[in-house]
């Protein structure tokens, strides 16, 4: 099995394209075949080296490696031109100056029949389509569809200046690379009869096709930036783990059975098959990804999660805070808002201050806390801290929450933090009493 991933570097690596890359990679790894990376950079204006780098970076982060390439399509320009010339020489293609207007007029006058031009000395180069028979697309996912040749327009394979169009380039490159399976997005399905006509004209055997279902947002509309993260770089910046992203992308159109959600990368390589890919649109639901990610976060070892968080935040020495935050975060980006105050001091959340520090009852509760903790011998273990704080509630009749919430705001500045006893134990005596004192004096 020889598959390919041919992104056009006109932007970041989108989620749909990442899924295409992943499926091809799983097929290659599962079958012992090869994955060829081809950068389709023939659109000179929109293809930039920065975008090429973004694609490499995203694939690298996902851990999707390739066996051949990167092949730059632009480097094959001479080969494409030679093929176009051969098709002209053999009479299978011809030049015609007819533009879109003439094509439209022709179809209107001929009962929607496909456009057939008259050979001229200049203009775009078109491949002649047969007038009889059908071109049958046999797709692993979508089944068989026959397209009537008489309805196909003579196909533009090169522009008037001789530069080949995508349809010609993709077929020549896939054929030269001996690609056996073309697995790509359903948006290319309607191009496939055209590609089959080019294979036929070249006397070449076409690959097997599989067109992956479109991606929709939870509202049923085509996936776009409106639905949140749209590219792999966005997902990475949001703090999703590579394993979770791979796991979730795999499920966008594929499933092993009705119930299994979690797959390791090795399992995916073994189990993935095109036969189990659905033709119905798949829904990209970031909430589901977040949920899956949370499970992966909780399963990491503390050391591993610490390393990832230190890379993500650019800060060091996070292990103690990671230990008590792991249960509470679903993405890497949720860590700092939860635990940053251990390192940078309390944040200022005016609403929290107003509600939990300013009332007299809060000040009274904090005053009790200060006395109790001041008398608490070290070491401050979590259980010792808990015992001491709960004892205040019993003694004063205050509700535990009326003590813990003001304390939380005094220590972190906000109403979200890891467990309150863990938080106190981690801050330790000096820092805790300092922060409580500051809240009482303010
Ligand atoms: N460069 C095309 C794209 O990114 C590739 C299409 C194909 O797989 O044939 O959409």
Image (cartoon, rainbow, N blue to C red):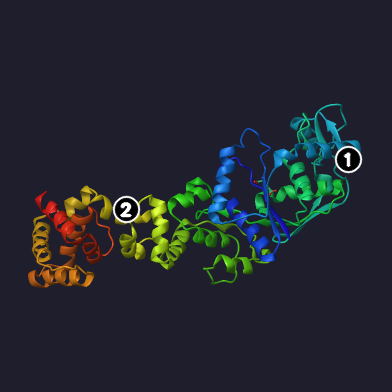
Percent from the top left, x then y, of residue 418?
Answer: 28, 62
| Crowdedness near tag 1: few (<14), some (14–19) or many (≥20) residues, C-alpha within 10 Å | some
Give me the residue at 86% from left, 46% from top: 201
Give me the residue at 63% from left, 69% from top: 270
User: Dot 2 corresponds to which residue?
Assistant: 337
Q: Nearer the viewer, residue 409 or 341?
A: 341
Give me the residue at 84% from left, 32% from top: 95
Q: Residue furthest top?
A: 121
Percent from the top left, x then y, of residue 410?
Answer: 18, 55
Q: Nearer the viewer, residue 111 or 378?
A: 378
Q: Quadrant of the N terminus?
A: bottom right
Residue 92: numbered disc = 1
Position of 8 relative to 106 (above/below): below
- Number of labelled discs? 2
Give me the residue at 87% from left, 28% from top: 120
Q: Is residue 135 left or right of residue 6?
A: right
Residue 372: numbered disc = none
Which label's residue is closer to the chain start, 1 or 2?
1
Percent from the top left, x then y, of residue 156?
Answer: 78, 37
């Amino acid at each position: 099995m020889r598959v390919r991933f041919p992104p056009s570097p006109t932007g970041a690596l989108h989620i749909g394209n990442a899924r295409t890359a992943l499926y091809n990679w799983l097929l290659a790894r599962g079958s012992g075949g090869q994955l060829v990376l081809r950068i389709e950079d023939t659109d000179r204006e929109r293809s930039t080296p920065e975008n090429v780098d973004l694609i490499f970076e995203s694939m690298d982060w996902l851990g999707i490696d390739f066996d051949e390439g990167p092949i730059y399509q632009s480097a094959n320009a001479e080969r494409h031109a030679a093929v176009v010339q051969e098709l002209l020489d053999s009479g299978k293609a011809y030049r015609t100056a007819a533009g879109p207007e003439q094509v439209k007029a022709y179809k209107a006058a001929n009962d929607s029949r496909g456009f057939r031009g008259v050979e001229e000395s200049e203009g775009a180069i078109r491949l002649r389509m047969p007038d009889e028979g059908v071109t049958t697309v046999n797709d692993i996912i979508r089944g068989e569809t026959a397209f009537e040749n008489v309805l196909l327009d003579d196909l533009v394979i090169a522009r008037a200046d001789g530069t080949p169009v995508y349809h010609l380039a993709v077929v020549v490159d896939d054929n030269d690379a001996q690609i056996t399976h073309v697995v790509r997005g359903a948006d290319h399905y309607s191009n496939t009869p055209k590609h089959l006509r080019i294979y036929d004209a070249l006397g070449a055997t076409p690959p097997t096709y599989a067109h992956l279902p479109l991606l929709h947002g939870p509202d049923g509309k085509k996936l776009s930036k409106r639905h949140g993260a749209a590219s792999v770089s966005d997902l990475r910046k949001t703090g999703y783990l590579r394993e979770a992203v791979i796991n979730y992308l795999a499920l966008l159109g594929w499933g092993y059975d009705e119930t299994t959600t979690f797959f390791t990368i090795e399992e995916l390589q073994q189990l993935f098959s095109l036969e189990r890919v659905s033709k119905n649109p798949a829904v990209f639901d970031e909430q589901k990804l977040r949920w899956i990610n949370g499970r992966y976060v909780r399963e990491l070892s503390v050391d591993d999660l610490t390393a990832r968080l230190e890379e993500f935040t650019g800060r060091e020495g996070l292990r103690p805070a990671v230990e008590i935050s792991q249960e509470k975060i679903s993405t890497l980006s949720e860590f700092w808002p939860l635990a940053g105050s251990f390192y940078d001091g309390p944040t200022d959340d005016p609403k929290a201050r107003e509600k939990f520090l300013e009332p007299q009852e809060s000040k009274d509760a904090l005053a009790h806390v200060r006395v109790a903790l001041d008398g608490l011998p070290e070491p401050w273990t979590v259980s010792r801290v808990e015992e001491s704080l709960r004892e205040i509630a019993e003694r004063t009749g205050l509700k535990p929450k009326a003590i813990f919430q003001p304390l939380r705001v005094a220590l972190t500045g906000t109403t979200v933090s890891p467990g309150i006893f863990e938080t106190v134990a981690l801050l330790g005596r000096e820092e805790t009493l300092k922060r409580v004192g500051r809240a009482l004096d303010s």
